[in-house]
């Protein structure tokens, strides 16, 4: 009987060592973003970029021999679902997350992560996300407080509109970026004749268009995502109302051209640089194209850079403690697919710049 107990003890110890070894050989990184919902196209960019970065790191031997495993979570760009996702990430024992994507989801989710010791690198742009003193949140994109002035400066110097409408979707991201542009234009003395909010999911914008026509609007800045702006531009074009439209990075994608048709021609968009055109990123571009994926999207590269940042720092300090990894990221410069990145004490990128693009009905954008 004693021999039998000893045999079971040896077996249990052997199994424990095997499990521990397997755990040490694998690092799970969560990807949290919209897999479903009206902005899932941006989630596609995020998930595909993350997977591409992980695949190439694993092919090169992983992180000091430790393979990365991606675990996907769908927050549908919904704040309540994002909190549920964050709690699931914690319960799954994951310490590192690429996400979330929508600012309204990122803010509540990262409150959970901060309390539970999970590091997140996001491509959300609302400034308030990093103004709460959290130590475990970083970005791989600029802020709306940078993007807004970039758009505003271009409007003032190049468009010089006479009568402006500011329209937004009443959400944290959309309203935030719209009011940032509003401030720049108002401070410069531009006549903002109307400021309107629309409801995400609405399909009929005839009353908004009628009001803009009545106010002789010649320039429209829209804060929000592409589905609503696409319909506004399509319906405006159909009535012969053709002001200059402009929006942030969340409207610059092929889908808006599908929705707006010819109404998308000439839309102005603030976007990050085209990192897919850099020679150093050829391996990732080729990998994505081999899978039938589009490597041009901005959130592809913010996600690639997020994974690369985590991997390089974890290779130096280990993956045991997210706070140690965060301390190493903060204030240091790390080479990524977006070039060398450096973060301030809040977790925001230092020196990030948005560019201005002219969008076309065929779904492409031309840098200006």
Image: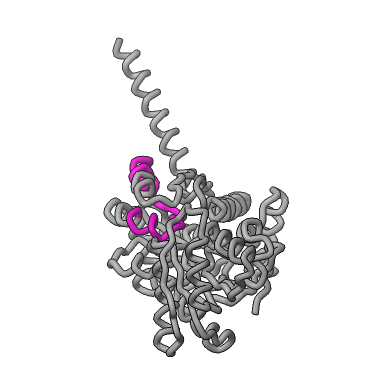
Say above or below: 329 vs 73.
below
Say above or below: 274 vs 203.
below
Can residue 105 be seen from the camera position used here? yes
Provide residue 192's location: percent of width, then percent of height: 44, 80
Task: State which quarter of the image contains the N terminus.
Answer: top left
Provide residue 357's location: percent of width, then percent of height: 62, 74
Task: Specify whether 84 is left or right of 162.
Answer: left
The answer to which of 174 and 208 lies nearer the viewer is: 208
Residue displayed at 46% across by 69% down: 167
The answer to which of 263 and 47 lies nearer the viewer is: 263
Residue displayed at 50% across by 76% down: 352
Say above or below: 314 vs 350.
above
Q: Quadrant of residue 121?
A: bottom left
Q: Is residue 108 magenta?
A: yes
Task: Specify whether 348 is left or right of 288.
Answer: left
Task: State which quarter of the image contains the C terminus.
Answer: bottom right
Provide residue 283's location: percent of width, then percent of height: 68, 59
Residue interval drawn in magenta: 86-109
Can residue 312 be seen from the camera position used here? no
Q: Is residue 214 magenta?
A: no
């Amino acid at each position: 009987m004693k021999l039998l107990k000893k045999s079971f003890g040896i077996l249990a110890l052997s199994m424990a060592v095997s499990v521990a070894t397997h755990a040490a050989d694998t690092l799970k990184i969560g990807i949290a973003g919209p897999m479903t919902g009206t902005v899932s196209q941006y989630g596609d960019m995020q998930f595909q970029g993350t997977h591409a970065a992980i695949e190439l790191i694993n092919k090169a031997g992983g992180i000091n021999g430790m393979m990365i495993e991606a675990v996907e979570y769908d927050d549908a760009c919904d704040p309540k679902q994002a909190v549920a996702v964050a709690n699931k990430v914690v319960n799954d024992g994951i310490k590192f997350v690429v996400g979330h994507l929508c600012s309204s989801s990122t803010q509540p989710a990262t409150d959970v992560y901060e309390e539970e010791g999970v590091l997140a690198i996001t491509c959300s742009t609302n400034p308030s996300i990093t103004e709460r003193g959290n130590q475990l949140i970083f970005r791989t994109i600029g802020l709306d407080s940078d993007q807004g002035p970039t758009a505003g400066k271009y409007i003032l110097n190049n468009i010089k509109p006479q009568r402006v409408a500011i329209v937004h979707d009443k959400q944290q991201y959309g309203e935030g970026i719209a009011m940032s542009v509003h401030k720049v234009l108002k401070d410069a003395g531009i006549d903002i004749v109307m400021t309107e909010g629309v409801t995400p999911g609405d399909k009929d914008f005839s009353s908004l268009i009628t009001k803009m026509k009545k106010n002789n609007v010649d320039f429209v800045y829209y804060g929000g995502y592409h589905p609503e702006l696409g319909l506004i531009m399509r319906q405006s074009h159909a009535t012969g109302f053709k002001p200059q439209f402009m929006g942030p990075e969340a409207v610059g994608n092929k889908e808006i051209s599908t929705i707006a048709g010819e109404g998308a021609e000439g839309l102005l968009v603030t976007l990050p640089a085209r990192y897919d055109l850099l020679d150093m990123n050829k391996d990732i571009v080729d990998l994505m194209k081999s899978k039938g994926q589009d490597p041009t999207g901005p959130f592809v590269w913010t996600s690639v850079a997020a994974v690369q940042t985590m991997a390089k720092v974890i290779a130096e300090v280990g993956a045991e403690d997210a706070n140690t990894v965060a301390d190493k990221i903060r204030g240091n410069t790390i080479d990524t697919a977006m070039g060398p990145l450096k973060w301030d004490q809040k977790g925001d990128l230092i020196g990030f710049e948005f560019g201005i693009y002219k969008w076309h009905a065929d779904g492409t954008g031309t840098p200006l």
